[in-house]
Amino acid sequence: MPVIIVDKELCDHCNTCARGCILGILEPAAGGAVPHTKPEMDAYCLKCGHCEALCPRQALTLDYLRDEKLDAAPAEAALDPEALLLHLKFRRSVREFRPDPVPRATLERILDAARYAPSGGNQQPVRWLALGDAAQVRKVAALTVDWMRTLPGTDHPLAPYVEGIVATWDSGVDRICHGAPHLLFAHIPRTGALDDVTEGVIAMTHVDLAAPALGLGTCWAGFVKMACDGHAPLREALALPEDRLVACAMLCGVPRHRPTCVPRRNPLVLDWR
């Protein structure tokens, strides 16, 4: 079965697809033949769909998950530049949430969009774990605090700061997960010395930026991520496979307060070369 399917009536032999092929395995149209891959090169296709996406006449279809192809035109995805830039500037880290859970369909809609985040070699290594209620999130917060209790007197960079956080927790205030109704984890394959959380962070950033468009707020759960790295009881509670590594964690829910203005930031520091 060929890697690509080309409609010979629509193809005008422009070879945009061949020039856009990341690995250069797509043979350009020549001598009346439409673009194609040589059979011996089919196995090297990354299934990234770049050839299909760039075809100006939509004459080419990647033979991969064809039933999932979106029926959408580029104009439908166009955003007003100023509105998009303002959306990015309004983004806030939320630390006060309404207690009501978010409908699962809403969270799944955001995570589905995050599947389209950039991925090296189109490996798409990111998988997700979503905690669906506040009790589960609070358990993670408690285990994170338990980990923090072990840090004073060590050379961990958080050691000088955790006593205050622990004391706040003991007084009944959650400064770890802030009462969020949901906690999202992006996890990746564990590869040993080459463990790199970049792809998980990229995918989670898509979640972070998409969430406000659906009325949700987020906050990166850095303490939870560090506890996942250093506290076996928390890893056991999450019950992820041994060969998976938490790349990052994010609080999610409906914010109790909405931003009404854009605060200032340091001036842009840019060095043109």
Image: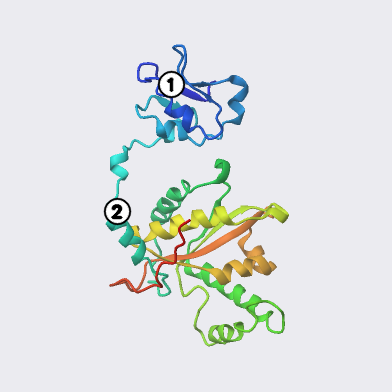
**Residue contact at pointers 2 and 1, CB within 8 angstroms:** no
x, y (%) of residue 171? Answer: 53, 88
Circle number at residue 58: none
Disc 1 residue type (three-letter): Val
> Which disc is residue 6 wearing?
1
What residue do we see at 53% from left, 46% from top?
119
Amino acid bearing label 2 = Pro
In percent of width and height, residue 144 lies at 60, 73
Q: Secondary structure at mark 2?
A: helix
**Tag 1, which secondary structure?**
strand
Task: Reply above or below: 69 against 182.
Answer: above
Instruction: Say above or below: 83 vs 18.
Output: below
Mark number displayed over residue 81: 2
State how far apart marks 2 and 1 are (Cα).
Answer: 34 Å
Residue shown at 41% from the left, 33% from the top: 54
**Which mark lies nearer to you, 2 or 1?**
2
Which residue lies most toward the front here? 273
